[in-house]
Amino acid sequence: MALTGTSGWSGHDCRRTAVTLMQKLGIAREVRMRVTGHAPPRDGAASYEHHGFEREAFAAVEKLAAEIERIRAVVLVSIGG
């Protein structure tokens, strides 16, 4: 937080923001939850589904990083940085 000049942020705030941004980017809920370390919902189908979503998670993180960089650039321009 010292690097950004902000305070009062928690890890949970960062997780919630990441999930919201990924939702905005159209990333599927299951992928968003896996990227942020949430367990998938347990239902009857879960015992049959074994796909780990590694490729999708990697692509989601790349999209998220690009969106954060886009936001950072807009903020820097708006503050004259």
Image: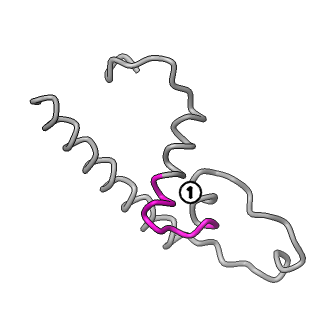
Residue at the spot 56% in from the left edge and 32% down from the top edge:
11
Which residue reaches farthest bottom?
48
**Image quadrant for the N terminus?**
top left
Q: Work out whether residue 71 or residue 10 is closer to the camera in this orientation and state it.
A: 71
Question: Is 53 included in the stretch rendered in magenta?
Answer: no
Residue at the spot 50% in from the left edge and 43% down from the top edge:
17
**Image quadrant for the C terminus?**
top left
Q: Which quadrant of the view contains residue 25? A: bottom left
Relative horizontal placement of residue 14, taking residue 1 as reference (left or right): right
Question: Is 24 included in the stretch rendered in magenta?
Answer: yes
Residue at the spot 51% in from the left edge and 18% down from the top edge:
8
Which residue reaches farthest front?
78
Q: Local crowd at mark 1 within 10 Å, few (<14), some, or many (≥20)? A: many
Magenta range is 21-30
The residue tagged 1 is: 35
Residue at the spot 58% in from the left edge and 66% down from the top edge:
31
Q: Callout 1, which amino acid?
A: Val
Prevailing secondary structure of the magenta residues: helix
Q: Work out whether residue 46 or residue 10 is closer to the camera in this orientation and state it.
A: 10
